[in-house]
Image (spheres, helix red, strand yellow):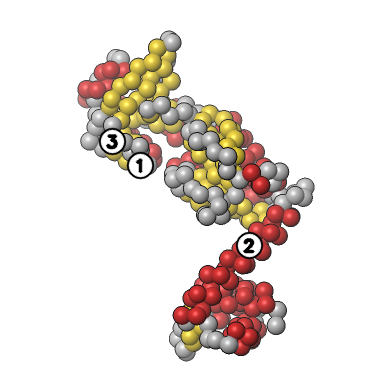
Amino acid sequence: MDKFSALRAFVEVAEAGGFSSAARRLSLATSSVVRSVDALEQSLGTVLLNRTTRRVTLSDAGAAYYGRAKKILEDLADADSLVADRGEEPSGPLRVSVPVAYGAHRIAPRVSTFLARYPRLNLDMRLSDDMVDLVTERIDVAIRLGEAAPTADVVARKLGSFRRHVVASNAYLSIHGAPATPHDLMNHHCLCFSFRSDQQVWTFSGNEDITKVAVSGRIKSNNTEVLREVALDGSGIALLPDWLVDKDIEHGRLHKLFDDYDVHPDDALSVISALYLPNQRGSTRIGAFIEFITSLIGTSR
């Protein structure tokens, strides 16, 4: 019995819920998958799968065995990728974590170009605004907006920067007027991004002065695309990244306010960083993705 082939067959059957579905995934005959799982159960002396004419489910022993078997197969795939990853052409699986709005708005529309350039890469792109654990979530590289907290366990590489704009629609400005100074925002409906604390402070830097303004409003969200849509609808003034609203500004759907200032939520920086583990230095897969993201930062929006 080929133990690794049997493990793959067992894991595929467990995940697919049937032998025929697993066989299609593995491009094998159903009878071959059945024989592999039978041989694995016989070698272990236990039943891993409960089988009926309608469905296949994990037994108690199978449920315990499944987690370990899947981890073994993943570790083997990682080992293969690590060796292959030192070649000239990036190849193998690449698991990345990117912020939700940035991934959907900036990366996804251009990812086909990246894959066409590297036909041997398989991209698994996971969208999350949380600071992911690269080890436990098996992430090769994470792209984050804002300066990453320094740590000895993670390499943080700055790729570029972006700007944030204070914006409002014609509909809002025609009813409420435009604020003349940053402090006037305290008398306006501001759309707040939910993070860190309930208190929203926008920091304005310009002419060697720093002005901090506590803003408030009836709408908060932890998603910048939601705030953009609400701003377009005329319900408030928002602080949003250039990569999200530049086209709206260009076409007159939103108007920039206080363009002479650099504006940040609290003391957050407007930088784009890549995070990866120290043992991934020299990875051609990660290097290719970082190069791709860097090229996006420099392109017109």
Question: Element type at marker 3?
Answer: loop
Task: Give the x, y percent position of residue 128.
Answer: 45, 47
Estimate how packed mark 3 is, as few (under 14), some (14 to 19) or many (20 or more) residues with alpha carbons within 10 Å: few
Between marks 1 and 2 in the image, the one whose residue lies nearer the viewer: 2
Please name the amino acid that badge 1 sits on: Asn
Placement of the N terminus among the 4 image quadrants: bottom right
Which residue appears at 35% of the width and 25% of the height?
Answer: 202
Q: Is residue 293 visible?
A: no
Which residue appears at 64% of the width and 44% of the height?
Answer: 278
> Which badge, 3 or 1, is on the more N-terminal residue?
3
**Residue located beneath label 3 in the image:** 198
> Residue 222 — which label?
1
> Which badge, 1 or 2, is on the more N-terminal residue?
2
Please name the amino acid that badge 3 sits on: Asp
Drawn side of residue 286 relative to residue 221, left or right: right
Task: Give the x, y percent position of residue 37.
Answer: 60, 83
Q: Residue furthest top?
A: 207
